[in-house]
Image (tube, rainbow, N blue to C red):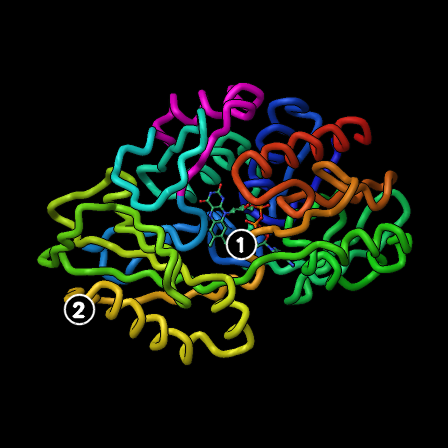
């Protein structure tokens, strides 16, 4: 039996784990490590310390299927719809540029429920707060090092973190890269932005007619969503939640500042944009240094194999594009690499 480590419990990693389990069943033992405290990656769903508040999505907001992907990835859409993980977006969205034939879907339980669904299906051993720092080639296997001194050997390793974080790994990874591969990986660029999540008490009312509003004329804020309304998950017992995304220029301008310094600036702009907002119970501020891919790895659709034996393969939206279908595309290509190697 081959032991496979998938680094990253985001959408790419969780789908890789699920597909590998379905295709190779008992021939593989799959382990997923993630440096965070929970699954989701950039499809994270946040909770307030107060259980009476709604949850909210700080990263990805909804899933948009173009006619091409609705067909080519139809089995994934059907599976998620059948399990109630996805449902059609019905709420009012102000300022959304509708494209011919596209369909938007929301996640009643939050975007991380997509990732959790695939992790559950995979039945993998999942370890959180395990931060991979280095990989060393040991004959036919990889010795993987964690930040807290953990060391474990695997027959194959899949890396799904944003590309700049792959380039930060120590050990034999840097030596493995050919000058051409390094150049391609260094060419990847991401947008950066801040996300603010505001949790309100159940007595709070948000009276606007929309659930989502795209803002085009504000230097700081580009997106606001009443998150529970967007997902069609409003409940009288739970307070509403609001998600705010900053524009990319604002994100870049304040990228090296502390979140604590930037949060009041965003809040001030929000109160100007939506005067009369109620007082939140709690606020979360997240800096997305690697938000969405602007330039993907050129010429490597879905994955880049750094070594065949033992297999070391990189995937994620950096090798395709930043959305649900980009991650599916990458997971399918990584699966091909795993199947031909194991
Ligand atoms: C603000 C924002 C809005 C977005 N909006 C949408 C949207 O509306 N619709 C849509 O489809 N997409 C959207 N996206 C893009 C979408 O979220 C991403 O394309 C997708 O989540 C990427 O998944 P991934 O698994 O490839 O990477 P990630 O989600 O980044 O997963 C990588 C995982 O690796 C872990 N990791 C990193 N380094 C290490 C390490 N050294 N050791 C262990 N673990 C590590 C991380 O903790 C993370 O969990 C948005 C993204 C952002 C940030």
Label 1 crowd (10 A; few <14 / some 14-19 / many >=20): some
Label 2 crowd (10 A; few <14 / some 14-19 / many >=20): few
| Sequence-first tag of 1 and 2 | 1
**In the image, farthest residue toward the left:** 203
Q: Quadrant of residue 245?
A: bottom left
**Magenta includes 76?**
yes
Q: Give x and y (percent) for residue 268.
A: 29, 74
- Residue at 64% from the left image edge and 67% from the top image edge: 148
Judging by the rendered image, the residue that carries numbered circle 1 is 128
Find residue 47 and name its label: none
Total marks shown come to 2
Q: In which quarter of the image is the C terminus?
A: top right
- Residue at 76% from the left image edge and 49% from the top image edge: 153
Residues drawn in magenta:
62-87
Badge 1 marks a residue whose secondary structure is loop
- Residue at 51% from the left image edge and 78% from the top image edge: 257
Q: Give x and y (percent) for residue 191.
A: 57, 58
Residue 20's place in the image compared with 327, above or below, is above
Q: Can residue 155 be spotted in the picture?
A: no
Q: Give x and y (percent) for residue 51.
A: 23, 55
**Eye-nearest disc, 1 or 2:** 2
Badge 2 marks a residue whose secondary structure is loop
Q: Give x and y (percent) for residue 162.
A: 64, 54
- Marks 1 and 2 close (CB-CB < 8 Å): no
- Nearest the viewer among 285 and 2 is 285
Does residue 303 appear to the left or right of 85 in the view shown?
Answer: right
Q: Can residue 299 be spotted in the picture?
A: yes
Q: How far apart are marks 1 and 2 (CA)?
A: 33 Å
Judging by the rendered image, the residue that carries numbered circle 2 is 279
């Amino acid at each position: 039996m081959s032991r496979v480590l998938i680094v990253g419990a985001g959408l790419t990693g969780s789908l890789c784990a699920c597909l590998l389990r379905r295709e190779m069943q008992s021939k593989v033992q799959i382990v997923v490590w993630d440096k965070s405290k929970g699954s989701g990656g950039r499809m994270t769903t946040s909770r307030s310390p107060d259980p009476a508040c709604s949850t909210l999505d700080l990263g990805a907001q909804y899933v948009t299927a173009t006619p091409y992907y609705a067909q080519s990835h139809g089995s994934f859409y059907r599976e998620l719809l059948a399990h109630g993980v996805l449902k059609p977006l019905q709420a009012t969205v102000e300022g959304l540029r509708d494209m011919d034939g596209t369909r938007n879907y929301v996640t009643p339980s939050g975007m991380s429920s997509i990732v959790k669904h695939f992790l559950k299906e995979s039945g993998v051993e999942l370890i959180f707060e395990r931060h991979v720092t280095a990989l060393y080639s040991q004959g036919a296997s990889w010795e993987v090092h964690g930040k807290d001194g953990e060391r474990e050997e695997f027959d194959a390793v899949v890396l799904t973190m944003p590309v700049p974080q792959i380039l930060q790994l120590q050990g034999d990874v840097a030596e493995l890269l050919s000058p051409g591969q390094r150049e391609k990986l260094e060419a990847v660029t991401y947008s950066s932005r801040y996300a603010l999540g505001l949790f309100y008490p159940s007595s709070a009312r948000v009276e606007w007619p929309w659930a989502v509003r795209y803002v085009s004329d504000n230097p700081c804020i580009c997106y606001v969503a009443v998150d529970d309304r967007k997902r069609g998950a409003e409940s009288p017992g739970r307070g509403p939640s609001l998600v705010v995304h900053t524009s990319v220029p604002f994100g870049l301008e304040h990228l090296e500042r502390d979140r604590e310094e930037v949060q009041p600036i965003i809040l001030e702009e929000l109160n100007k944009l939506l005067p009369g907002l109620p007082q939140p119970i709690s606020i979360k501020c997240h800096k997305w240094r690697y938000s969405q891919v602007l330039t993907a790895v050129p010429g490597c659709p879905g994955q880049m194999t750094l070594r065949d034996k033992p297999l070391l393969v990189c995937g994620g939206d950096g090798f395709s594009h930043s959305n649900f279908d980009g991650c599916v595309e990458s997971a399918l290509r990584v699966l091909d690499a795993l199947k031909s190697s194991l």
